[in-house]
Amino acid sequence: MYKKCAVYLSVSLLVMPLVSADEGGDTSAIPSLQLSLEQLPRTCPALPVSLDVADQTLLQAFYRQQQFTQVWSSPGRLDALLAQLEQLADDGLNPASYQLASLRSAAQPSAVTQQAECSDILISHVYLQALQHLQRGRLPQAQIEPFWQAPSQPEALVPAPVAAVDALLALAVFGVNDLPAAFQYARPALVQYQALRRTYAQLRQQPLASWPPVASGPLLRPDMQDARVPELTQRLVSEGYLPATATSVDNRYEPLQVAALKAFQQTHALQADGIVGVGTLAALNVSPFERREQLRVNLERFRWLAQNLEATSLLINVAAGQLTYYQAGVAVWQTRTQVGRPQRPTPLLKSQITRLTLNPRWSVPPTIFREDKLPEIRRDLSFLSKHEMQVFDREGNQLDAGQVDWSNPGFIQLRQRAGPKNPLGQVALRFANPFSVYLHDTPSQQLFEKAPRAFSSGCVRVEQAVYLSQQLLSEAERERVSTLLATGKTHEFRLASPMPLLMSYWTAEVDSAGQLHYVPDIYQRDAALLAALDSARL
């Protein structure tokens, strides 16, 4: 059900098949516009080539609710639609891709009935597409940034795609009389989306900022002298991190500039150490235009996110290494995470946490065994005992490590005992997925102080993982879990109430104080999404 609107049309009514003129029978009682719709694209060759079967079905359902009369001939209605399409620029969408010139031409009076009907159909197609792009995204996420979703729950009464079409049509039908409200209803109510849209709308109306690049060079540390310090000072002045009167004396990197750079690093999710290294230099040298385009990219991601985020759930921003716990739509707790490094990225997915592994053993995945552990073992066989690892064959029989031919070990598995050296820590949070990833505790707590935090092999290490697991339990369950944890032995504990989990990815957002924050694009995905947005056409 779409937000803020109480009207909900039945799916069966909306997709009811039309009486086709091609079936033979008397067509004299069939409205002319219905016949035009049934015979697309032959009757309206000027319609977009992208008007596929799904688009045609959508149009037929839309016009059925209008009794197959022209929608856009009412005075002022098309002008109102054009105004709303122009405002899509504030959503990071390109109004020109919605064929504004063609729609304006379609507004001209026509003596030919079929031409008028085709013009009306074109306008309706653009209208429906615009609402759909606001609701669900301009692009299909799976084609741009792979996203895996667990199968729908069997108790679902209406399949999600059908329900989405139902809601879109209900909004479109009842929105033609109040187009500003219809477009506002279609926009995600997601806090992240609304805040970023406001900021982007303001920025795109302003002259594009300008700032000088900072030259590359060795690490620049506090109190060092460097010819780049004046460049750095001016760069920080350009975005207000330093006052316009700030200067450098003898090219020395002084406390005033250091404090300003730390503030810059904090708003760009970098290690706030005041050191100008490779990552900080790269962030300083992103152009103003590229930064503004980054907001467009993330508005699209938030449109995707809005379709999948449940009111009570865990949300992970993989790019930022951050987990947020939502209850009834309100963020109630947040913690840091460590995610997969670029060579082994953490997948994006939606699933449900269904069980906890307490005091987990770690079965080393094949890739990690082959690329990480096997070279260590070949150098020093005592690596196994130092890390409390055991060796097993395909049938699960324990092997004597000294009898294994480590130059060609064949199929074997390493398993690390539960305990303080185990990389999974005290608890692992399990959920269905085809990637063999999960959330877990970690003994590498010092890495949570780093930024960015892309250190793992794909799983998500969670700061305060035990505390997080307790939040998913009832009081009685917490007592039981605490008892089992204290034994030091491995136990599987199934949750009475599974917790929805969404692992997403975004690189810019606005906080509750209105401050814009950027996140390093650790998996280099922004450019591909931006290119896809720029090339998208109806």
Image (cartoon, helix red, strand yellow):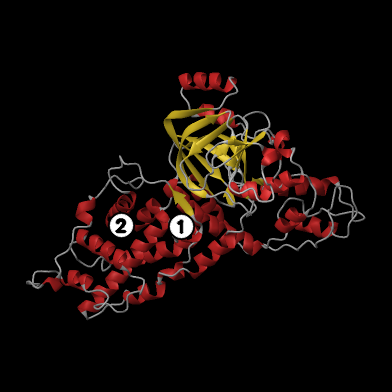
Q: Marks 2 and 1, how far apart in space? A: 25 Å
**Neighbours of disc 2 within 10 Å: few (<14), some (14-19), many (20+):** many
Task: Write down the quadrant of residue 18 in the picture.
Answer: bottom left
The one of 81 and 276 positioned closer to us in this rendering = 276
Task: Determine which residue is flagged by label 1.
Answer: 142
Q: Mark yes or no: residue 238 visible.
A: yes
Residue at the spot 54% in from the left edge and 21% down from the top edge = 484
Is residue 390 left or right of 498 when viewed as pictured? right
**Neighbours of disc 1 within 10 Å: few (<14), some (14-19), many (20+):** few
Residue at the spot 54% in from the left edge and 59% down from the top edge = 296
Task: Determine which residue is flagged by label 2.
Answer: 172
Label 2: which secondary element: helix
Q: Residue furthest right?
A: 250
Residue at the spot 40% in from the left edge and 54% down from the top edge = 135
**Mark carried by residue 23:** none
Task: Write down the quadrant of residue 496 in the picture.
Answer: top left
